[in-house]
Amino acid sequence: MLSFEQNVAKPDPRIFATACDLLGSDPADVLMVGDDPVADGGATSIGCEFREVPHLPVDDRPQALIDIAEEVAGEVAGDLPGNLPGV
């Protein structure tokens, strides 16, 4: 989905809400990854989490999404009951 197809532009929250609807996901369960904290960070206005990647050509950041996925997976694993302090 491209924002112009929806007649809205980032950071308008409607583009992020539409994306969440199309995913069938609650915004609280969605992670927006982008290179512009103003435009892409607009997702936070509807409750999405936002992670920034470097504003570089894609070829210059081939690991960007992998690094964030590994970071998020580590955070999720850290929240599992067996990893909670005192559990």
Image (cartoon, rainbow, N blue to C red):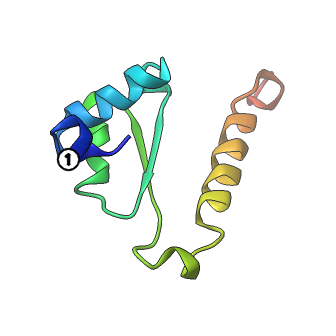
Residue 15 % position (x, y) = 26, 36
Given residues 38 and 77, the one toward you in this image is 38
Question: Can you tell which quarter of the image residue 36 is in?
Answer: bottom left
Q: Is residue 37 above or below residue 56?
A: above
Q: Tell how many labels.
A: 1
Residue 52 % position (x, y) = 43, 60
Q: State which quarter of the image contains the N terminus.
A: top left
Q: State which quarter of the image contains the C terminus.
A: top right
**Left or right relative to 42: residue 33:** right
- Give neighbour class at mark 1: few <14, some 14-19, many 20+ (Cα, 10 Å): some
Residue 17 % position (x, y) = 30, 27
**Left or right relative to 28: residue 80:** right
Q: Which residue is mark 1?
A: 11
Dot 1: element: loop
Q: Is residue 30 above or below residue 66?
A: above
Residue 44 % position (x, y) = 30, 38
- For the question of whether residue 47 can be seen, the reply is no
Which residue is depicted at the point 70% across and 43% down? 73
Given residues 19 and 42, the one toward you in this image is 19
Q: Is residue 64 above or below residue 7?
A: below
**Left or right relative to 20: residue 23:** right
Which residue is depicted at the point 42% across and 23% down? 22
Q: Residue furthest right?
A: 82
Question: Can you tell which quarter of the image residue 48 is in?
Answer: top left
Which residue is depicted at the point 26% across and 44% down? 3
Which residue is depicted at the point 31% across and 27% down? 18
> Looking at numbered disc 1 in the image, what kind of residue is underneath it?
Pro
- For the question of whether residue 84 can be seen, the reply is yes
